[in-house]
Image (cartoon, rainbow, N blue to C red):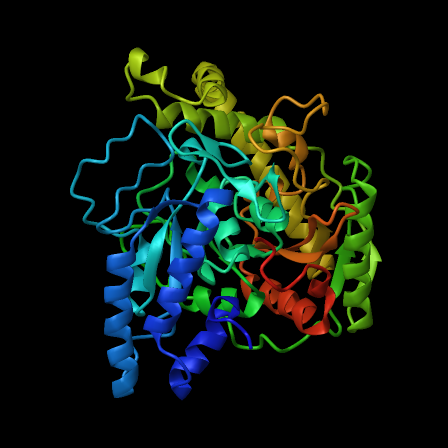
Amino acid sequence: MTELTDLTAVQLVDGYRKGEFSPVDVTRAVLRRAEDVQSAVNAFVRLDHEGALAQAEESAGRWRRGEPAGLVDGVPVTVKDLLLQRGAPTLRGSKTVSEEGAWDEDAPSVARLREHGAVFVGKTTSPEFGWKGVTDSPRHGVTRNPYDTSRTAGGSSGGSAAAVALGAGPLSLGTDGGGSVRIPAAFCGIFGFKPTYGRVPLYPASAFGTLSHVGPMTRDAADAALMMEVIGAPDARDWSHLGPAAGGFRDGLDGGVRGLRVAYSPSLGGQVAVRPGVAAAVREAVGKLASLGAYVEEADPDFADPVDAFHTLWFSGAARVVQHLPPGRRELLDPGLREICAQGARFSALDYLAAVDARMGLGRRMGLFHEAYDLLVTPTLPVTAFEAGVEVPGKSGLRRWTGWTPFTYPFNLTQQPAATVPCGVDGEGLPVGVQLVGARHADALVLRVAHALYVGGAALGVPQTRPFP
């Protein structure tokens, strides 16, 4: 018999509607699961048993009356600890942030989930201010991979990825400024989606500017589409929000891929060295798209690595995050964060604007590319999960996390929707992700193609049961 913690959000809502189980049953199971795995993976900075069970009781009453509050009424949700949640301190992985305060405001995505009756189980771990592609911080320590706890869960939404992978809630809110939803989702064998910038409103505005997106981390694409229906609603606090989407994210989800023009770029034109086990799994997923009726050809978007522009924008944003801290308080920061903040503070306004120019050029190139192709497919990452507690793989010779994430951060620069779908495992049994990138505003298309991979079986290379313990 399937355990309650194995069910997707779509399955939970269906079960509530049929009276097969209640939100209280599910919330208790999820809280037990979260407690069971916490010591092994460190997915949470806070679990709220009392608050979650009270919300679940209220939801159960609404379901008994046949009056659910919304699309995810009674579904357990976790929230990355960079996003405001009413009644819960948002500590951002930093010893420089005080727990004291009113904490009386929800981020827009959290507010929409609350309006739809979601049950908030806890806050998930992040590196300090979400600055890097792995999850460890001076305040909360190291978050580990469910498939091998000696390895990283990825980051910066590593706690969310581990929680979803282990059944500690089917839905989680992550943020993605350079891959921070997609990286840990790929490492932990779950689905992660970075929507078009502005599709999900964000408040307070990120110091990393328009690189930073909010997106769902889920068991599959259908759950992400459901979640997008909720969190994609407007919020007046975000001046850059796109407004209501044309049509729902679940509309046409079962439309398949037949006739779509898909460009497969295995290494961005030879720029990226991809490990053989990763390349093989991604190639198999691409073959599945072809077998489902897509027109697939190997083609590259033909852009030079935009890492210098990304670093200018990212490091400047990091410097802005800590600008208010006096020198003595800065000693509390992650040493790597201190380093990039110092570098970011040295950039001039002209350096920043030159990076913006490079960004606009890349956006133009990708806009033209998508006139020929509906979708770009790449590996999500060239590697699988490496040792925990370090920024880069050992003996790689790399300096920063961007050295091993060349497939993710370019599409934060361009603001395009991008998803990672688990497509297999490497020789060590570690999950591999395939990345689907659409033109700006083609969020529903990306979700539709991802859903086709789940329905078509390409995502079944990763075990569908809870990986650990």
Question: Which sits in the foreground, 419 or 44?
Answer: 44
Left or right, 165 with reference to 398: left
Residue 383 in the image: above or below residue 48: above
Residue drawn at (24%, 58%) of the image: 50
Q: Residue 217: horizontal and vertical position, in percent?
A: 50, 56
Count of all numbered marks drawn on residues in the image: 0
Residue 96 in the image: above or below residue 50: above
Residue 412 in the image: above or below residue 282: above
Residue drawn at (75%, 61%) of the image: 262
Q: Quadrant of residue 283?
A: bottom right
Screen quadrant of the N terminus: bottom right
Question: Which sits in the foreground, 231 or 141?
Answer: 141
Q: Is residue 213 at least partly visible in the picture?
A: no
Left or right, 41 with reference to 392: left
Question: Which sits in the foreground, 109 or 2?
Answer: 2
Left or right, 231 with reference to 178: left
Residue 272 in the image: above or below residue 198: above
Q: Residue 427: horizontal and vertical position, in percent?
A: 79, 47
Residue lying furthest left? 102
